[in-house]
């Protein structure tokens, strides 16, 4: 009699441009997992705030109920789950540009913003199960520490800041990787840090394929 396979939860955290999303996307395909990029959630929430003229944390606190009337949903395409806002999934170039890069970490440091996304992100496990995936792989900054501290596998990806800045530049995107990392690591709520017990992988001298192969072997052994 074959034993029923356990539904897996994999957490992948790391700094800006550390390769979290590309790695997680490839692992999702290889292991029939649903991939959720939580960075995209923070980027998506930044859009209605920017539209209201909110460009920093001070503006956020000065405006009345800035997160009210924002309805969050999930659209699954292949192995990828995207967050919709009031029924619409924003295009990639809307959320990945220098305007959003410049404000996203400030918004992500606001406890109300993080609380707003917490339940939604936890719920993605049920979405993955309902859709028949073998598990969930979620990447971000606080997945292994706050969202799923009980995950079956927690990975923390690092790479030299120069290597990460080079990768972002190769994508043709203006981004202050080091500056966002500083903000993310120094904030009070859910700071970027390698949680105890997580597997740390330095990808400075590894290719994407090598990182994927390393983690893939760990997932297969679960
Ligand atoms: O693509 P990149 O690695 O540069 O960043 P991202 O994963 O798209 O995340 C954008 C920003 O959202 C980060 O700089 C963090 O400020 C914030 N974020 C967060 O605070 N917590 C998460 N779980 C994911 C992202």
Image: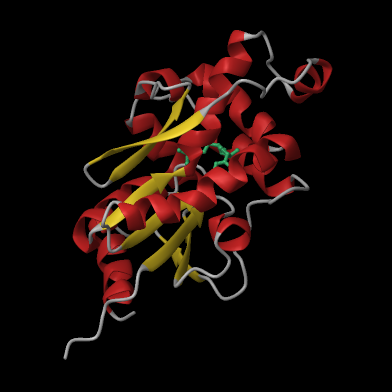
Residue sitting farthest toward the left: 1
In front of the other: 131 or 135? 131
In front of the other: 179 or 120? 120
Residue 62, compared with residue 8, is above or below; it is above
Residue 115, compared with residue 1, is above or below; it is above
Residue at 32% in and 47% down: 22
Instruction: Report if residue 140 is visible in the image.
Output: no
Q: What sort of colour scheme is used for the picture? A: secondary structure
Q: Quadrant of the C terminus?
A: bottom left
Residue at 35% in and 69% down: 7
Q: In this view, does 221 lie to the left or right of 160?
A: left
- Residue 184 is drawn in which quadrant? top right
- Residue 107 is drawn in which quadrant? top right
Residue at 74% in and 47% down: 186
Q: Quadrant of the N terminus?
A: bottom left
Residue sitting farthest toward the bottom: 1
Residue 166, compared with residue 88, is above or below; it is below
Number of dots carrying numbers = 0
Q: In this view, does 115 lie to the left or right of 176?
A: right
In front of the other: 38 or 118? 118
| Relative image position of residue 77 (x, y in whole percent) | 25, 38
Residue at 53% in and 26% down: 71
Quadrant field for ligand 1: top right
Instruction: Report if residue 162 is visible in the image.
Output: yes
| Relative image position of residue 87 (x, y in whole percent) | 42, 22
| Relative image position of residue 162 (x, y in whole percent) | 48, 43
């Amino acid at each position: 009699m074959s034993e029923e396979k356990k539904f897996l939860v994999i957490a992948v955290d790391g700094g800006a441009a550390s390769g979290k999303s590309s790695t997680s996307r490839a692992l999702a395909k290889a292991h029939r997992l649903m991939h959720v990029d939580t960075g995209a959630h923070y980027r998506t929430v930044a859009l209605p705030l920017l539209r209201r003229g909110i460009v920093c944390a001070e503006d956020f606190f000065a405006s009345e109920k800035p997160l009210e009337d924002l309805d969050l949903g999930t659209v699954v395409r292949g192995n990828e789950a995207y967050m919709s806002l009031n029924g619409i999934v924003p295009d990639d170039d809307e959320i990945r540009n220098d305007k959003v890069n410049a404000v996203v970490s400030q918004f992500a440091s606001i406890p109300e913003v993080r609380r707003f996304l917490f339940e939604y992100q936890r719920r993605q496990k049920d979405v993955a199960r309902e859709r028949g995936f073998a598990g969930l792989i979620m990447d971000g900054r606080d997945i292994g520490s706050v969202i799923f501290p009980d995950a079956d596998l927690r990975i923390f990806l690092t790479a030299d800041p120069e290597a990460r800045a080079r990768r972002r530049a190769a994508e043709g995107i203006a981004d202050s990787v080091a500056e966002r990392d500083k903000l993310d690591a120094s904030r009070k709520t859910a700071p970027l840090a390698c949680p105890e017990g997580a597997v740390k992988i330095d990808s400075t001298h590894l290719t994407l394929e090598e990182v994927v192969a390393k983690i893939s072997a760990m997932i297969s052994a679960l």
